[in-house]
Image (spheres, helix red, strand yellow):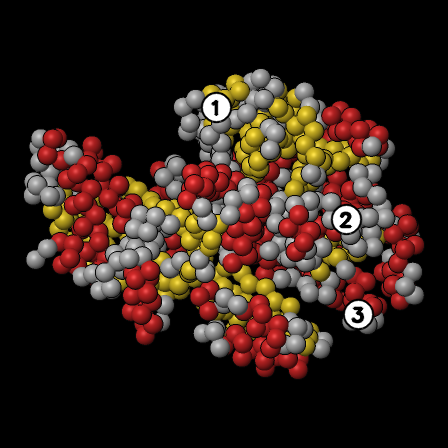
């Protein structure tokens, strides 16, 4: 305990020296060893015992994480490391690897400046490795590489020394290919991973040893010695001669940037405000005396202190009692406690200066992604997630008296996890929660029942579809109920390049107009349309192509409301729309404002857009997952049949020794129960993972049946609506 107290004192001292701080994340595919690696680093820092490191899983402190053996929540820890005779503060975030919890990885990348990318030496680059690397590069987070489980290559795959070095070299080349493909400019500016520069280390997180070019010079232990130690099963002495925490953190400190260096580079990518403003300059300099600028990346409930908001402080110094504002909210809130995390423990401190990861309580109306500041400032760029909610379950309280509590709990959970979507079905009164996958929703249900002590019943999982169009239609006339206002709207598909720009966050209504226009034109959009963009909802846009219409400016807000209503619930099956360009071609408005209020304009705009979509060859899109299965060669046929039997396609088959890696894709709707079936089909010998691959059109022979099933479930009329249902004869 005294050792822990001593660590806390050292942490407090170093928090004020940004040059001595490294904010880093550990990212990887599931089961590649992130949490075991974190254990070994913590043991080296004296926060947990060496004996328990690797099995304690200190950062998986949530009971379900221990039970299931996976990381569900990103967890923070601050520790001290000595390098070249000086002490450094390492603020570390251990992130989940399972695709359903990818939102935590995205949020963690906003808080850190560098990332240790962990790759399993046997499995190599896996889908989630690619995803987390892309998330890091998008946030301007610099990577270094740790190739884990090297001992498995030697002892399980029985490779020789030459083959071992070849395989390790291949992993480095593949990661570099990814970095180059995702961000060529940074790759050429020194982000290329290279053993000679020391940006790659090899080792075993479980056995707590590692080697790098620098450690080889100091210890004399290179690949030959590693090979011999592993062969003779003398791994323990490897851990003593070249301890993992020493080698890895000695790589992190010189190669990953401190907040002073990082913020100069990162602020332009994550904040689009005026960089010459006082807050802009303070953030670029990481100024502890500047205005408070905090980006919230995590929220959790503390039974005693209430909501704890954790995030990266880019400017200013946080102290208890300060009055701060949450961007977009009218009232100020007072900070009650300021603290730092050491795994499960939140420790109160007097103050935390910029450049650190901090936890605060007392701030009302905060959600994940909020900007907290001491002055009025432009908020940080909203965090864009790689995947979208694709599975829904209906949740009901077992006892009617618990209904108000259920509403409160769901509201709280959606604040803590923005990848969770909560809505009330007006027809049935059910609460619908949509998430990234079956596991995501299972965990949410577990948290409602166990953490919040609220008995619930959940429906079987339902797939979320999207509505889109394949042709053009319009202009279609929409009349207001009083017949005094008319709107002429056409619809056409939005090019895929534009959809991707919107989904990635590169194009939004908050981006400066000139910059936005340029990006849209580069993606193939007509200049006049790019110039007249009026609104974006989801991945759909409304363009105003009218000229000089009186009163339109004050009516536009209501037209946008009608547009958003349709994009939330399309005409085919009341599912969200995707990739639709609605164009306002002409408008006739009554000169008296009384006759063009919300009750007149919104229904008219809504009807015209609904009808235009139904005339433009509407289609239903279903969510697709990439499926990766690794099996022994003799089980390949069974695994392939399992994928193909679920409307899946096999895209690629690769051999790695006696193992085969199958890459395929299949619809989410067909993958329920896949885990159990693939296990029995391959006698439990398959390793498999999935990754979100976007939405694709549902085959036309299934479309009508699926639309009817959705309409029946939602209590709608079974007949698919026709344009005339919306615009009359």
Report x, y in % for residue 726: 16, 54
Residue bearing mark 1: 325
Q: How crowded is mark 1: few (under 14 residues within 10 Å), some or many (20 or more)?
A: many
Report x, y in % for residue 633: 66, 80
**Of helix, strand and loop, which one carries label 3?**
loop
Q: In this view, does 244 lie to the left or right of 269?
A: right
So how many labels did they put on this image? 3
- Quick check: can you spot residue 585? yes
Report x, y in % for residue 24: 67, 41
**Of helix, strand and loop, which one carries label 2?**
loop
- Marks 3 and 1 close (CB-CB < 8 Å): no
Give above or below for 549 relative to 688: above
Viewer-nearest residue: 444 or 111: 444
* Among numbered discs 2 and 3, the one appearing first in the sequence: 2
Separation of marks 2 and 1 at Cα, in angstroms: 40 Å
Q: Is residue 678 left or right of residue 536?
A: right
Residue 56 marker: 2
Q: How crowded is mark 2: few (under 14 residues within 10 Å), some or many (20 or more)?
A: some
Locate the N terminus and report the quarter of the image it occupies: top right
Quarter of the rendering containing residue 12: top right
Separation of marks 3 and 1 at Cα, in angstroms: 56 Å
**Of helix, strand and loop, which one carries label 1?**
strand
Residue bearing mark 3: 156
Taking the spot 51% from the left edge, 53% from the top edge, the residue there is 441
- Marks 2 and 3 close (CB-CB < 8 Å): no
Give above or below for 241 relative to 349: below
Quarter of the rendering containing residue 360: top right
Residue 352 marker: none
- Quick check: can you spot residue 653? no
Taking the spot 78% from the left edge, 34% from the top edge, the residue there is 80
Viewer-nearest residue: 615 or 259: 615
* Among numbered discs 2 and 1, the one appearing first in the sequence: 2
């Amino acid at each position: 305990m005294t050792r822990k107290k001593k660590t806390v004192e050292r942490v407090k001292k170093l928090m004020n020296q940004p040059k001595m701080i490294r904010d880093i994340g550990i990212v990887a595919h599931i089961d590649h060893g992130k949490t075991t690696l974190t254990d070994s680093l913590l043991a080296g820092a004296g926060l947990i015992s060496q004996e328990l490191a690797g099995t304690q899983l200190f950062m998986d402190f949530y009971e379900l994480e221990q039970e299931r053996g996976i990381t569900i929540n990103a967890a923070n820890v601050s520790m001290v490391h000595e390098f070249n005779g000086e002490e450094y503060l390492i603020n570390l975030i251990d992130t989940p690897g399972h695709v359903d919890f990818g939102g935590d990885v995205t949020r963690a990348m906003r808080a850190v400046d560098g990332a240790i990318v962990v790759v399993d030496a046997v499995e190599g680059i896996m889908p989630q490795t690619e995803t987390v690397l892309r998330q890091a590069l998008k946030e301007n987070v610099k990577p270094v590489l740790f190739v884990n489980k090297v001992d498995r290559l030697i002892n399980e795959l029985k490779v020789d020394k030459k083959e071992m070095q070849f395989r390790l070299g291949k992993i480095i080349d593949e990661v570099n290919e990814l970095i180059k493909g995702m961000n060529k400019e940074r790759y050429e500016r020194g982000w290329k991973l290279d053993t000679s520069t020391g940006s790659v280390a090899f080792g075993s997180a479980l056995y707590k040893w590692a080697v790098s070019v620098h450690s080889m010079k100091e210890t004399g232990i290179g690949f030959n010695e590693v090979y011999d130690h592993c062969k003779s099963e003398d791994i323990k002495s490897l851990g003593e001669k070249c301890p993992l925490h020493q080698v890895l953190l000695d790589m992190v400190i010189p190669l990953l940037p401190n907040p002073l260096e990082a913020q100069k580079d990162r602020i332009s990518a994550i904040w689009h405000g005026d960089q010459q403003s006082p807050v802009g300059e303070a953030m670029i300099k990481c100024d502890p005396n500047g205005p408070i600028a905090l980006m919230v990346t995590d929220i959790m409930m503390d039974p005693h202190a209430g909501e704890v908001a954790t995030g990266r402080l880019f400017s200013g110094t946080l102290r208890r009692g300060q009055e701060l504002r949450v961007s977009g909210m009218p009232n100020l809130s007072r900070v009650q406690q300021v603290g730092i995390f050491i795994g499960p423990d939140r420790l109160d401190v007097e103050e935390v200066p910029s450049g650190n990861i901090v936890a605060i309580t007392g701030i009302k109306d905060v959600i994940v992604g909020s900007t907290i500041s001491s002055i009025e400032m432009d908020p940080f760029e909203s965090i864009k997630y790689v995947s979208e909610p694709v599975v829904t379950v209906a949740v009901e309280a077992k006892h009617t008296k618990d209904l108000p509590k259920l509403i409160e709990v769901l509201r709280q959970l959606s604040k803590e996890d923005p990848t969770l979507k909560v809505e009330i079905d007006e027809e049935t009164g059910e609460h619908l929660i949509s998430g990234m996958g079956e596991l995501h929703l299972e965990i949410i249900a577990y948290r409602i029942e166990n953490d919040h002590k609220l008995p619930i019943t959940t429906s079987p999982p339902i797939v979320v579809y999207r509505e889109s169009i394949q042709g053009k239609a319009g202009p279609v006339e929409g009349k207001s109920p009083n017949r005094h206002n008319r709107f002429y709207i056409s619809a056409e598909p939005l090019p895929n390049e534009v959809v991707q720009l919107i989904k990635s966050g590169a194009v939004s209504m908050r981006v400066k107009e000139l910059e936005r226009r340029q990006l849209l034109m580069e993606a193939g959009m007509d200049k006049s349309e790019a110039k007249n963009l009026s609104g974006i909802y989801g991945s759909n846009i409304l363009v105003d192509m009218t000229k000089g219409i009186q009163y339109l400016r004050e009516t536009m807000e209501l037209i946008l409301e009608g547009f958003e209503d349709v994009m939330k619930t399309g005409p085919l099956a009341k599912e969200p729309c995707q990739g639709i360009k609605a164009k306002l071609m002409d408008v006739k408005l009554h000169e008296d404002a009384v006759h063009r209020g919300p009750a007149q304009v919104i229904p008219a705009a809504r009807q015209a857009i609904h009808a235009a979509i139904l005339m433009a060859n509407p289609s239903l899109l279903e969510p697709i997952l990439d499926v990766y299965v690794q099996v022994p060669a003799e089980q390949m046929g069974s695994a392939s049949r399992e994928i193909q039997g679920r409307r899946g396609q096999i895209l690629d088959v690769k051999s790695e020794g006696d193992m085969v890696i199958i890459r395929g894709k299949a619809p989410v709707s067909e993958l329920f129960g896949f885990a159990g079936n693939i296990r029995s089909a391959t006698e439990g010998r398959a390793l498999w993972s999935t990754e979100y691959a976007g939405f694709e059109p549902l085959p036309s022979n299934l479309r009508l049946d699926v639309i009817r099933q959705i309409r029946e479930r939602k209590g709608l009329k079974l007949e698919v609506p026709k344009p005339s249902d919306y615009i009359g004869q």
